[in-house]
Image: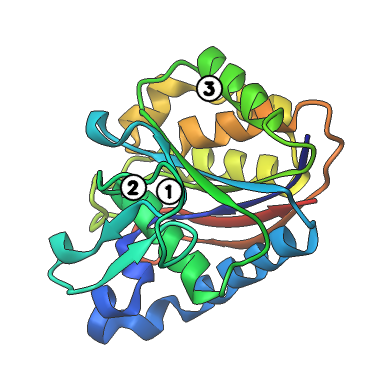
Amino acid sequence: MLVAAAVCPCPPLLVPAVAVGAASELDALRAACTDALGVLAASRPDLLVVVGPADESGRGVHPQGTPGSFRGFGVDLDVRLGGEVPGPGASERELPPPLAVAAWLLQRTGWSDAPVEGLGVGEPLAAERCVQVGGEVGERAERVALLVMGDASACRTLKAPGYLDERAAGFDAKVARALAAADVAALKALDAELAYELKVSGRAPWQVLAGAAEGAGLGGALLYDDAPYGVGYLVAAWS
């Protein structure tokens, strides 16, 4: 059963070594992510499942100890999901970048509170299937926690990766309200086609969260809501 969840964005710029001179610009975001992970630790989970967007090569389960890297962003930095030592079943198939960011966050906060498993989900995954997957994840252990990675729209300003789309702010506000209220129904109802058009990477992971949280009776708190580079970054904690 799901006992807690943390929702964090997944830009590689969260890692100071990647951001370089702009690292301090995301200090408040990093602090919010740390606070959200603290909620996970306080929930005393038996299992932590990290859910994030992935392309075809990164979809599926990534066991504890699976390696990740930021070398593709010009940084000689390696991480492992849930710790430095590979766990049983760990493969050398690399984590997709969003899960590598999650691994970095867990490593940064010294996570040692429960075993960790990664789950990469594809952007095209239908809402109904996301919810079904979430329900299955929620049954993986007696006390399950989720770390859910994903960005909101990438179309908030003229200089955003997806340029300015007037629909972006409204979409992000809807997601922010749903995360603040732990509103499972609102997350399930997110428009997948609109999310795709707005270059949202978090839609499928958020709907996996909705499936896992069904009937769990969790409350929500929104810890961060901003778009510093024209991309919506949201941090929330459910418990």
Q: CA distance from mark 3 to mark 2?
A: 22 Å
Q: In the rendered view, does 158 fall on the left or right side of 65?
A: left
Name the element at disc 3. Answer: helix
Marks 1,3: beta carbons within 8 A:
no
Q: Residue at x 39, y 80 (%)?
A: 25
Q: Is residue 21 above or below residue 137?
A: below
Residue identified by numbered label 3: 130
Determine which residue is flagged by label 1: 151
Contact? badges 1 and 2 (CB < 8 Å): yes
**Quarter of the image holding residue 18?**
bottom left
Q: Judge whether residue 229 can be spotted in this image.
A: no
Q: Residue at x 30, y 52 (%)?
A: 97
Q: Nearer the viewer, mark 1 or mark 2?
A: 1
Residue 168 visible in the current orientation: yes
Q: Position of residue 143 (x, y in %)?
A: 78, 43
- Nearest to the eye among marks 3 and 2: give it: 3
Residue named by callout 2: 154
Which quadrant is the N terminus positioned in?
A: top right
Local crowd at mark 1 within 10 Å, few (<14), some, or many (≥20)? many
